[in-house]
Amino acid sequence: MRLVLVGPPGAGKGTQAQFIASRLEVPKISTGDIFRANVSGGTELGKTAKRYMDDGGLVPDEITNAMVRDRLAEDDAEAGFLLDGFPRNIAQAEVLDDICAALGTSLDVVLELRVDFDEVVKRLSGRRTCRKCGHVWHLEFDPPSQDGVCDKCGGELYQRDDDKPETVRNRLTVYSEQTQPLIDFYTGADKLVSIDAQGPVEDVTERAIAALTPFA
Ligand code: AP5
Ligand code: MG
């Protein structure tokens, strides 16, 4: 299956992506994760991306599109993929169609995760990420047993720079102005399915799998 997850910051795209990708046996490709890996690795791509990420804006399309094009050309994406965080505007969606066409295939489905605004703010303000293994925790909804320490690997937990309140506000504005139009775009292409992404993580995963099954 070739699948895109779309939803506002904090909707649970990354959280659900790992479960859905493993159930569907496809690689999970998160543009935000790839940018953050480049930021911590100190690469040129990371230095450029950080300038945009710190304000909550989008990294320029030509950089992002080239990165996705390269990633989708890798062998493990041949039989399917799950994209988390791409596309984020109409221009990126059109490029994704072109990339798929060049690979002799097309996108199967776009899954929208729907979450209330207040819930998104709560999820982002309590999010903590492990520096070592990247696991994502939440201070209230999925707390680690010891403050600041990852239960999975013992790594140090940190708060993402772009989860500061003023940056979160900007990310939400960017979402409604640039990303939300994708909902109509993919509805028009008859590829959109939406689920309620509130409630326990496992329940959301089950709703996602049920919604995706007709496309398998
Ligand atoms: P990105 O990393 O993609 O950030 P985002 O879209 O803002 O989304 P988040 O990762 O913040 O939220 P999420 O939906 O993954 O939620 P999560 O699962 O973590 O992008 C970051 C930046 O990179 C962008 O701002 C941009 O600058 C750049 N970028 C990336 N892609 C780009 C592109 N295509 N073009 C240009 N620039 C791009 O969950 C959040 C919290 O809630 C966690 O703590 C989690 O534990 C908790 N949680 C999850 N599910 C539940 C639940 N059901 N109940 C309770 N808590 C839950
Ligand atoms: Mg994410």
Image (cartoon, grey):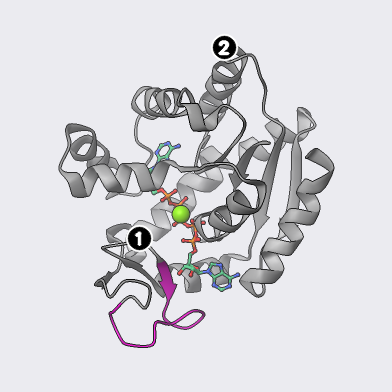
The magenta-colored residue range is 136-149
- Residue type at tag 1: Gly
Question: In terms of secondary structure, where does tag 1 sit?
Answer: loop
Residue 53 magenta: no
Viewer-closest of 74 and 199 = 74
Q: Residues within 10 Å of mark 1 (few under 14, many from 20)?
A: some
Give the side of residue 76 with respect to residue 38, left or right: right
Question: In terms of secondary structure, where does tag 2 sit?
Answer: helix
Q: Is mark 1 within 8 Å of ligand 2?
A: no
| Residue found at x 29% / y 79% | 149
Q: Is residue 52 above or below residue 153?
A: above
Q: Which mark is residue 134?
A: 1
- In the picture, the quarter occupied by the C terminus is top right
Viewer-closest of 114 and 207 = 207
What residue would you read off at disc 2?
102
Give the side of residue 16 with respect to residue 167, left or right: right
Q: Majority secondary structure of the magenta segment? A: loop
Q: How many marks are shown on the rendered structure?
A: 2
| Residue found at x 34% / y 26% | 63
